[in-house]
Amino acid sequence: MRKGERTRQEIIRRAAPVFNQKGYAGAALSDLMGATGLRKGGIYRHFRSKEALAAEAFDYAWAQTLRARVHDLDARANSVDRLKQMVANFVERRGTIAGGCPLLNTAVDTDDGNEVLRERARKALEVWRSYVSEIVEEGIKAGQIHKHADAQKVATLLISSLEGAIMFARLTRSDEPLRVVQQHLDGYLEGALRAQPR
Amino acid sequence: MRKGERTRQEIIRRAAPVFNQKGYAGAALSDLMGATGLRKGGIYRHFRSKEALAAEAFDYAWAQTLRARVHDLDARANSVDRLKQMVANFVERRGTIAGGCPLLNTAVDTDDGNEVLRERARKALEVWRSYVSEIVEEGIKAGQIHKHADAQKVATLLISSLEGAIMFARLTRSDEPLRVVQQHLDGYLEGALRAQPR
C-alpha cells in the first residue's frame, strides 16, 4: 500500500468513532483534526469533503460491526443455531467502534437529511437483512426451519428488535434490554422457527 | 396565558420538528429562525440557550408522541387488548411531529453527548416503560395475563421492538417492518401472555 493510501485509511479509521459518537453535523472539523492529528489541509488532501470522509468512515465502521455480528456463525452447522449465535454476538460483541451501532446512529442521523450517508446506511441494512434472510432460507431447505417461515420477515424482526434494544441499553446504560430481547428471540427461534426432526 | 408565555409556547411548538428532524447539532440557528419567523434576539429572549430550547422542544414532542401511542387505551377493558392497541397506535398513529420518534432520535443523538437532553430522553423512556409495565401488572392482578409474566421485561421487549422497527421503516421508507413487528408482538401477546379463562 502506498503511503498516501495508508494515510487515507488511517484517517478513516480515526474519524469513524468521531462520526459514530457525534453524528454527521456534530462532528466538527476540530474533532476530526484532534482524532487524526492532522490539520484541515492534511485531511482534505485525501477527501474532497466532510461528506466523503463521513461516508467512508461509515462503511469502515459498519464493516467492523457486521464482522463482529457474524463472528463464528459458520462454525454452527444448524441454521437456527446460527441465528441464535448472531443474536448472542449482537449482545456480547459490541463496542467495536465507540458510540454504539453505526447503522442505527447513521439511520437516525440522516433519515431526514444527508442523502449520501442515508444511502450508505440503507445499503448496509439491506446487506444485513439479506445475510440473515439467507440463513433462514438455507435452514428451510435443510429442513431445520419450518417451511412456512418467511425469511425476509424473520430477518426484519430480528434486526428491528436488536437495534431497538441497543438504543434502550445505551440510553439506560444497562445491558438488561439486550438480555431481555435475546431471551425473547431465542425463545422465538426455538419455539416458532426450529423444525422438529421427523 | 400572557403574551410572553404564548410566544414561548409557540417557539417550542415550531422548534420541535426542527430538532426532531435535524438533531441537536444539526439544528442551526438559521433553521430555528426560519421555523419560528423570529430573529435570534426574539428566540433567546425566551430561552437562555439552544440547549434549554431543545430540552423544552423534546418534552413537547414527546408529550405529543406519547399521547398518540396511548390513545384510546382506556377504552379497552382487557390488559392484553390495551397492549395490542398500544402496538397498533405505534404503527398507525405516527407523524405527530415530523422526523420520526423523538425518543429514538434524541436517545441516539445524545447518548454520547448532551447530558441535559440525554436525561430528558432517559426520563421519557422510563415513564413509558412504567406505563406499559403497569398495564401488565394490572393484567396479572385481574387474571388476564399469566401470573409468571415479568411486567418490566414485557415493557422492555415491546418498546425495543417497536423503536427498532421505526428505524427500519424510516430508513427503508416502508411500513413493512412495523407491520412485521406488530404481527409478531400480537402473536406473542396472545400466545405467551394472555391467560386462558378458567
Image (spheres, coloured by chain):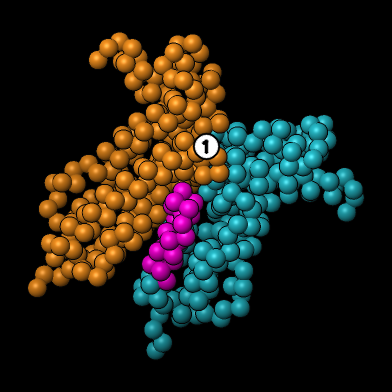
Chain colours: A cyan, B orange
Magenta stretch: helix, strand or loop mostly: helix
- Residue B67 in the image: state x and y as whole percent: 26, 38
Q: Chain of mark 1?
A: B
Looking at the image, residue A113 sits to the left or right of residue B117; the answer is right
* Residue located 15% across and 62% down the image: B141
* Residue located 51% across and 68% down the image: A88
In what quadrant of the picture does the C terminus of chain B appear? bottom left
Local secondary structure at mark 1: loop
Residue carrying label 1: B114
Q: Is residue B70 visible?
A: yes
In what quadrant of the picture does the N terminus of chain B appear? top left
Q: Amino acid at mark 1?
A: Asn
- Residue B128 in the image: state x and y as whole percent: 31, 47
- Front position in the image: A25 or A191: A25
Q: Is residue A84 above or below residue B165?
A: below
- What are the residue bounds of the magenta stretch? A163-186
Looking at the image, residue B126 sits to the left or right of residue A110; the answer is left
Occupied quadrant, residue A131 = bottom right
